[in-house]
Image (cartoon, coloured by chain):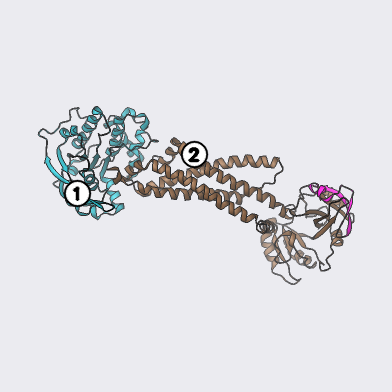
Amino acid sequence: MVALARKTLVYEWRRFLPAILAVGFAGLLQLLQLALVLGIFGSTSMYITGSSADVWVGYPGTQSVGSGRSIDADVESRILMDPAVTRVEPYIWVDGDWRGPRETGGVSVFVSGIDTATDGMMFSRVLSPALRARLDEPDAIVVDRSALDQLGVGIGQTATINGHQVHVVGIGSGLRALGGVNVLCSLDTARRLDSDAEDVGPTYLVAKLRHPNEARAVARRLRGDQAFGPYTAWSARDFARLSVLYWLFDTGAGAGVLFLAGIVFLVGAVITSQTLIAAVNGSVREYATLNALGVGVAALRRVVLEQAFWVGTLGLLGASVLGIVLMLLARSQDVPVILNVPAALACIILVMGLAAVSGLAAMRSLRRADPATLLR
Amino acid sequence: MHRPASIAVTDQPALRAIGVSKAFVSGHLRTQVLDDLTLDIEAGELTLISGPSGCGKSTLLSILSGLQKIDSGSVQALGSELGQLDLRALERFRLEHTGFVFQGFNLFPALSAFEQVELPLNHMGLTRDEARRRARLSLEEVGLAHRMRLRPAELSGGEKQRVAIARALAKEPQLLFADEPTSALDAANGQMIIDLLHRIAVTHGTTVLCVSHDPRLVMHADRVLAMEDGHILSDRRPAAPAIDSHGTPS
């Protein structure tokens, strides 16, 4: 088979370049925006992804980690009864009002009360064992390095949260929060800082499983029982996704991503289809001759569609290379960018969809390839 | 490349038009291009339709080759009633039986001469080897064996038209239609193309129908039809049927 589509693309690359660039930049734009948004909003699930728990148990209908309600502490024994569970620990979330030693005004803080045992699951991936041990001290807290200025404290200094005095015993990293500042302390300290009389139990119970890959099935199993009051269970992965999605759509960032995707698709498709149409028009007499010789219109359409496919592929390739370079650059500058498989896949689908739509649009101009017009 | 004579030599004419009328409507203006035209084209001959521009000769060619529908009458090609074939069946008919040579050469700039010829063969259901064999033979027949790796930009006008002829010839069609095949060429190249077309009719038994106002072609044709205003004015056979003066490499 003579590879007409590919040979034409190579020989007349200048003609196809605008389409390849349009597709490439459309892909790149979308890729970087997604990576940025995921990077920024990924921190809202840091509580889950930074911890080693496999299953999370919390109040039904909880939309993100930061919006939990307390559940009955006795649920813990119910969870432990499940043969798949090896360990359970409570996690207390308290919204606090921070008053620092310096003039910072009130700062909204998210207090995380965690199990300080050396094998504690909460923040096990971001909190060093030494720092964790220091939290055993009553009213001791650890904050993220990036929040020190915001809180107006240094190590060893004291401040108040909800009117209770706390002192900073350590400084961690990777504990950044969105819309507030994370403060880590022991479960006991957290209970003291909680001013809400209605909060009697922990906000969450987190569990470790014998086989982490069963998380989803175990979570489903734990959900069924209502004996200890309202609670529900998620696998850590599902809960992390829930949190990120909540932020994405609650803040309108998700709508922004979708909006840009629409714009990118539209602009990309217009440029690409115009380029492909021009390419078809440039060869319309040759196509008409092939049709006169009996090569069917369907076969000619395939040629156009194949060209669109190659334009999409080449654009994607360029976008990938540039995207990786730019993401590495962003990482080196501490710009939070995260790209996961679904996001990358979404970009690929967007770009190839754009190319396909453009190809379909260009196919229409094949109607001008009527061999009768060659005989005039 | 020799076609069995049984296909070319039959009692039936290769092409037959009966009472064919065709008009073009442009706005309120209706132009009658062909008016109740009846015509037989014999198989295995080079038939030339000549006449001034606008006389309807190209329209007649496109109707006889199934590229255009008629208003009334009937057209038979190789015994098939073209009016009864739908678009796909017409494509199929053209794929199996017809070759075309146009005034413009209409070659893909990206393809070599060899690929130009091979491309339509790919769609005929031939094996790759058979398609390539035919493409090579066909290019050899038009004298371009040494130029078949070149792209159109590297070929002269005459060579391009020979590639276009090879492209049509490689399909081994029973019908070969040529529309003003020499008008874009100089005298020497034009002469070469005429010789080629005539040789194809003689050696392959192909029915060659050529439309041209080029007077040089007349002496090479087996039969010359003069057209004017949608009618055939004269139908004659030049006294001495032109024997290929350049020798036939058969």
Query: Can you identify the residue that label 2 sits on?
Result: A17
Mark 2 or 1: the one toward you: 1
Which residues are the magenta region?
Answer: A145-172
- Residue A340, given in percent of the width and then of the height, sits at 63, 49
The residue to which callout 1 is attached is B34
For the N terminus of chain B, the quadrant is top left
Identify which residue is drawn at 39% across, 43% down: A281
Res. A168 visible in picture: yes
Callout 1: SS: strand
Query: Within the magenta stretch, is there residue A158?
Result: yes
Which chain does the numbered disc 1 sit on? B
Question: Taking A361 as reference, is A102 left or right?
Answer: right
The quadrant in which the C terminus of chain B is found is top left
- What colour is chain A? brown
Please give left or right for residue B80 compared with residue A179 in the image.
Answer: left
Residue at image position (73%, 66%) is A59
Residue A181: x and y, percent? 79, 53
Q: Please give the name of the residue rendered at 19% of the width and 49% of the height, measured from the top-left corner.
A: B34
Up-down relation of residue A277 to residue B147 (above or below): below
Residue B139 position within the rendered picture, expressed as x and y whole percent measured from the top left: 30, 33
Disc 2 to disc 1, C-alpha distance: 47 Å
Residue A211, picture quadrant = bottom right
For badge 1, the amino acid type reads: Leu
Badge 1 density bin: few <14, some 14–19, many ≥20, Cα 10 Å? many
